[in-house]
Image (cartoon, helix red, strand yellow):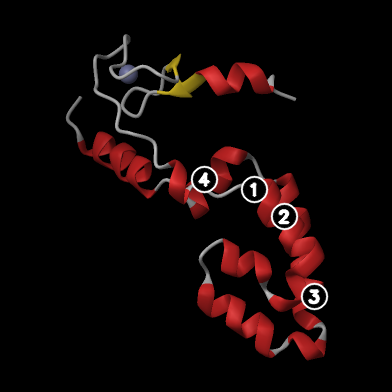
Amino acid sequence: MVNKAYCNFVKVCQSCGAEIYSGAKICPNCGTRQLKPKTKGKKSRITAALLALLLGGIGAHKFYLGRIFQGLLYLIFSWTLIPGIIALFEFIILIAMSDERFDARYGKPDVQMASKSDNNRFT
Ligand SMILES: [Zn+2]
């Protein structure tokens, strides 16, 4: 396991990917100004996993992750108990998934775009 306290003080530069102090406005490595992290839209992987485990049968984790349409399907078909079985698998996937993969899938769309434009840059 990674040291939690350490993580709270370190973030990854949005441009060069170097580990920098989380409060830094400008990356000391490449000099790129850091955008404000959107903590409001940040989803917790553990919360999503627990919702899938406890309330997955009614699609609670789907609603939490912003997949409203999928959540409604879970809700409609909850009486078949099939969504509950699928949610159990999704619980295992969410628990096994790394935070980086989770963020790439369910959050931080601005960071994804930043790395995309990086790839188009001439080297
Ligand atoms: Zn940097």
Residue at the outermost left position:
122
Vertical position of residue 46 compared to residue 121: above or below: below
**Mark closest to the chain's N terminus, 1 or 4:** 1
Residue 54 coordinates in the image, percent (x, y):
81, 64
Residue type beneath disc 1: Arg
At mark 1, the secondary structure is: helix
Residue type of the residue flagged with mark 3: Gly
Residue at the (31%, 9%) spot, across then down: 28
Residue ID for mark 4: 103
Q: CA distance from mark 3 to mark 1?
A: 18 Å
Q: Indicate which disc, 2 or 3, sits on the residue closer to the N terminus.
A: 2
Residue on which the image places disc 1: 45
Residue found 36% across the figure and 40% down from its top:
111
Rendered location of residue 51, percent (x, y): 72, 61
Question: Which residue is the site of mark 2?
Answer: 49
Contact? badges 3 and 4 (CB < 8 Å): no
Answer with mark 3 or mark 4, whichever residue precedes in sequence.
3
Instruction: Determine the CA span between mark 2 and mark 3.
Output: 13 Å
Task: Name the amino acid, label 2.
Answer: Ala
